[in-house]
Amino acid sequence: MKKAIYLSTALTALAVAAHAQTTINVVSWGGAYGKSQVEAYDKPFTAKTGIEVNMIDADNPATPLKAQVEAGNVTTDVADVEMSDAIRYCDEGLIVPIDPKDLPPAPDGTPAAQDFLPGALPGCAVASIVFSTVYGYDTTKFKDNPPTTIADFFDTKKYPGKRGLRKGAKVNLEIALMADGVPAADVYKVLGTPEGVDRAFKKLDAIKKDVVWWEAGAQPPQLLADGEVAMTTAYNGRLFNAQVADKKPFKIVWDGQVMEWDLFVIPKGAPHMKEAMEYVKFATSTEQLAEQAKWIAYGPARKSSGPLVGKFMDGVTEMKPNMPTNPDNMKNSTTVDSAFWADHGTELEQRFNSWLAAN
Amino acid sequence: MADTTAALLTTADGKPLKAALVRAQSRARRRALLLVLPLLLFILVSFVLPIGELLKQSVENDYFTANMPRTVQWFQTHPAGTPPDEAAFAAVALDLKDGYTARTAPLAGTRVNYDMPGTRSLFTSTARKAAQMQPPYKDALLAADPKWGDPMLWATMRRVAPAISDDFYLAALDRTRDVNGNIVQVSQDQRIYIMLFLRTFGLAAAITFICFLMGYPVAHLLATLPLRKSNLLMILVLLPFWTSLLVRTTAWIVLLQREGVVNDVLVWLGIIDNQHRLAMMYNQTGTIIAMTHILLPFMILPLYSVMRPIPPSYARAARSLGATSWTTFRRIYFPQTLPGIGAGSLLVFILAVGYYITPALVGGASGQLISNLIAFHLQNSLNWSLGAALAALLLVAVILLYWLYDRLVGIDKLKLG
C-alpha cells in the first residue's frame, strides 16, 4: 500500500515535471481574438509538437512584459503586442531579434521577407494580423437613414444617441481629424502640428458629453448590445463576431478605419526560448494565418495567406468582404504611425487625460 | 538598602534572584519576539521594501545618466548656461554611437521625452546615423537633425543628466522648468494632477460624510436593539462586506446604467420619459453611490463597537434632569460616540482616497480619481517614476491627515472595536 502511494506520488511528480517542461506561456488579448488564436495556432501546434500552450489574457500584453523583463523575472514566452510597443521594446532591447530568414517560406517557395506585407517584420517581431478600429452601430436604431461616413459618428444631431470610444488618445485623434475632413493620407502631417492637435480635440469636444469610454476590446460590443450606446468604435473582429456568431443587429462602417498590426514578440530571457521560437514560426506560417481568418475577421500578414482565406467557421459567411484589408473597405483608411506615437504619445496621452478629466 | 536586601535573596538553587529574574524576563522577551518575527518579516518584505523601492523610483531615473556617460560628464564640468561646444556635441555623438550598439539610446531618449515631447525619435534616428559620423561632430549632428541646435533640448538634457531629481514631483504637481531653470506651470491643456488630487479629496470627503449620515443611525439601531435582533441586522451589514468587490460594483452598473433597472422602472412609472433617462453611471454620481455602498461597513462597525458599551442610564439621567431629547443627544450621547466617528471617518476617507477599481469601472470621465492616473502611468504610459511620484504625494497627504487627526482629536481616542 505504502509503496503504491510512493509510486503514484513519484509518477505524479514526474508527470508535473514533464508537463512543466513543455508548456509555454503566450500572453494575448483574450475574447474572440484569443479564441481564434487558440483554435488556429495553439491546438494544431500542440498536436504537431506536443508542446502545451498556456494562453494568458491581458488588457495590453505589452505591459506585463516590460514589468517582467525589468524585474528580471520573465514568465512570458511569447506575447502578442501592437506595433508601437514592438518597435519601442525592440529599440530598448526588451525583446529578442527575429531574423526573417528563420521564418518558413510561402508554399510556393517565396522567402518570408518577401511574403509578408510591407512593414510586417520590424526586426524583433513578426506580424500575424492587421486589425482595424472601425465604428459599428445598432441597425434597429437607425433604420431609415443609416450612418455611412466617419463624420456621421460625430454628428449627434442627425444621429442622436450615446457614442462609445476607447479611453486613450491614439486612434481617436486620427478618427477625429478624418471626420473633420482631413484626407486620410495627411492625418499625421496635420496631427504633427499644434493646430492639428487642437483641431482633433475640438472635434472630440463636439461629442464629449455623449461618450461612454471603453478600455478592453470586449466592452464595445457589449455596450452596443446593452443599448448603452447607439454607435461605438471597436476592433473590427470583435464587431464581426458579435454580428455573425452572436447574431446581433450590428453594422460596421469602414469609412475612416484605422488599421494596426498585431505582432508576436519573444521577451529577452523567455524561459522556453527555443519552444517560443517554434511557436512563432508555426503560427505565422501561411496556412496557420489563413486558418485564423476562419475564426475572426482580421487580415493575415502574409500575401500568400490571402487566397487561402475562405469562409467563417459557420461555413456560410465569406470572410474576404469582412477583412480590413479588403480593397472596398480601404477607400478612406489610414494605418497607425507607430513612430509618431512613440514620439508624441506621452504628450498627447497626457493632454487627452487632462481633456478627459476637465468638465 | 533595597539593593543589599535584593542581593541577599537567592533562588532555591542558590543563584541571585535578580539575575534569575532578568534571565527569565529576557527569555520571555525573546520568545515574544520570535512569535511576532514572521509578521515583522512579512511586513518588511511585502510592505516596507516595495514602498521604499517606489519612493526611490520617484526621485531616481537613470535612463539618461547610465546611457549617456560622456554627455553627463560634460554637463558636470561645464556650469549651467554654457553654450554647447564641439566637445559637448562629440560627447553626444559618441554616446549615441555606443547607445546604438548597446540598444540603449532609446532609453536616454525616453527620459528626455518625458520632459520635452517629440525628442525620443531624435535620439533613435540620430543613433542610427551616429556610427558613420566624423568630426566635427557639431556639424554632423546638426546635419542629422537641426533640433540638436535647440537650446531647450540642451537645457532639458542638463536637467535630466543627474539620476536623482525632483522632476517627477514637479510633473506630478503640474509644474516644469523653463529654459532658464525656473519652475513654471505646464501649459493649460497639460494640467491635470492638481485638479485630480483636489477632486479625489473632495469626493473622498463627500463619501465619508454620506457614510457617516447613513451609518450613524444604523449603528445606533444595532447597538440599542436586543442582541438577537441586532445580530440578524448585523449579518445584513456584513453580507455585502463578504461579497466580492467586483460583483458589487458590477451590480451597480446593472442597476444604474442608462438601460438599467432603475431607469427602466422610472420610465415604466412615467416619472421620466424614455428620451431623458438619468445618467447615474459612468460619472461622479456613479462613483459616489458605488463607493459609499462599498465603504459603509467600515463606518458602521467602529461606530457600533463604540455605541454598544455606552450605558443607557446616562441618557436617562439627562432626561430626568430636564434635558430635551435633542440636548441629551447633543450633550450626552453624541460626545461619547466621537471616538467611533473619528475611527470610521478616518478609515473610510483613507480607503476612498486610494480607491481604484470602482472609479475605474463606473467613473467614466468625470469620476476618475488620482489612483486611476497612477495606474495609467504604471500600466500604459510605463512612466513608473511619475506614477511613483504621484503615489508618494498621495501617501504624504494621508500621513499629513493622520497627523492632523492626532493633533486635533488624539490618536489614543481612536477606537476600532
Image (spheres, rainbow, N blue to C red):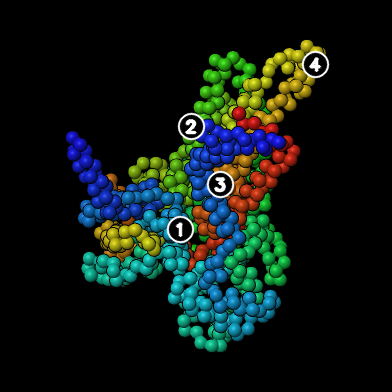
Residue B292 falls in which quadrant of the image? Answer: top right
**Label 2 secondary element:** loop
Which of discs 3 and 4 lies nearer the camera? The answer is 4
Chain of the residue under the numbered disc 2 shown in the image: B
Q: Residue at image x 62%, y 43%?
A: B353
Q: Identity of the amino acid at label 3?
A: Val
Q: Nearer the viewer, residue A231 or A164?
A: A164
Percent position of residue A331, x then y: 43, 61
Distance of mark 2 from mark 3, alpha carbons? Answer: 31 Å
Left or right of A77: which side holds B71?
right
Which of discs 2 and 3 lies nearer the camera? The answer is 2
Q: Residue at image x 57%, y 28%?
A: B266
Which of discs 3 and 1 lies nearer the camera? The answer is 1
**Label 1 secondary element:** helix
Q: Residue at image x 73%, y 17%?
A: B314
Distance of mark 1 from mark 2, alpha carbons? Answer: 34 Å
What residue is disc 4 on?
B323
What residue is disc 3 on?
A211
What residue is disc 1 on?
A71
Mark 3: few, some, or many residues within 10 Å (few <14, many ≥20)? many
What residue is disc 2 on?
B243
**Label 3 secondary element:** strand
